[in-house]
Amino acid sequence: MARSGTEGRGVLEGAFALMEVLARGDEIGLTRLAADAALPKATAHRLLGQLVALGAVQSSAGRYRLGPRTFRLGQAWHPARALRAASARPLRELASVSGRSGVSLSVPEAGHTLVVGSTRSEVDDVFPLRSGVVLPPGSAAELILTASAPEAEPPEGWSRAAWAREATRAREQGLAFQYGQCVSALSCVAAPVYGASGQVVAAVAATSLESKRIASLGEAVGRAAAMISANLARPARSADRGAGESAAGVPGAGSAHPVRAGSQ
């Protein structure tokens, strides 16, 4: 007999599909939650009951949200620890000059673009830009990460040719701009962060509800990315000096990777 619901796709996969939807930040009712997770309503209800009993999900008045047990488990995972330490001050400084714009740091993770650092802003009312959130396909941050790996597949909604053109532009400018392509109300600009080896390891971005502000934020975003890159390169520079080698020319620091504002 053919299996349906999570019996066909796996109970754990179904449970994680529900939690992925809940991770977007809002309390959600059963009908929408089941639809967004692509599960039969009865299956979603059964799995949610088990997740609530385990403390992984909370339920109130027929609506669901992630529970304290999921929060505790999430706090135990610390992605890109060195990167987050290197970015703490530059992100704060970028936030101070970005006004009401959201500031974020993202890394590639299992085919997605994952936020690992951010500041609170009015952008959160439109999209929950916080650590642990997966950015929508085609974000400026994803474009920056793709620009360093041109063989990557284009995200949903983009043709290979169009995405390749945008990646080339981002690579040439050192910045990527997006105006409402991912979330209609939001625009963003992103710049690459380089590791000690010279590879792009992350993207810094500023996101705003005001598209006209994005071009003017490009320089500040590029400066923050260069500062983080320099912080990551510092241990390698010290080792190079000890061996009598020059530390000049580290990508992403100083004039090694000039950043100029692009156009819409």
Image (cartoon, grey):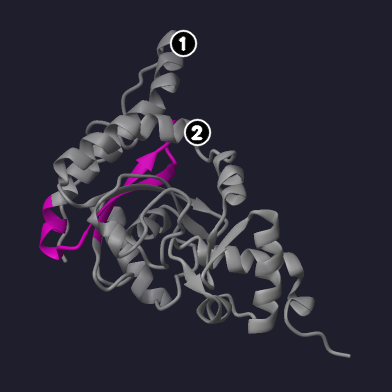
Q: Nearer the viewer, residue 107 or 41?
A: 41
Frontmost residue, 172 versus 176: 176
- Please provide percent x and percent y for residue 205: 29, 50
Quarter of the rendering containing residue 176: bottom left
Mark 2 lies on a secondary structure that is helix
> Is residue 119 placed above or below 48 in the rendered structure?
above
Q: Position of residue 45 (x, y in %)?
A: 66, 76
Image coordinates of residue 230 in percent, x first then y, are: 33, 28
Q: Which residue is mark 2?
A: 81
Where does label 1 land, which residue? 243
Quadrant placement of the N terminus: bottom right
User: Which circle's residue, 2 or 1, is located before the other in the chain?
Assistant: 2
Magenta-drawn segment: 188-216
| Left or right, 113 with reference to 264 | right
* Farthest bottom residue in view: 1
For image coordinates 46% across by 11% down, the residue present is 243
> What is the spatial separation of the Cα atoms under label 2 and label 1, in whole angstroms?
27 Å
Q: The disc labelled 2 sits on which kind of residue?
A: Arg
Q: Is residue 197 magenta?
A: yes
Relative to the observer, which residue lies in front, 183 or 112? 183
* Residue displayed at 58% across by 63% down: 19
Give the quadrant of the C terminus. bottom left
Which element type, helix, strand or loop, lies under badge 1? loop
Picture quadrant of residue 158: bottom left
Give the residue type that dot 1 points to: Ala
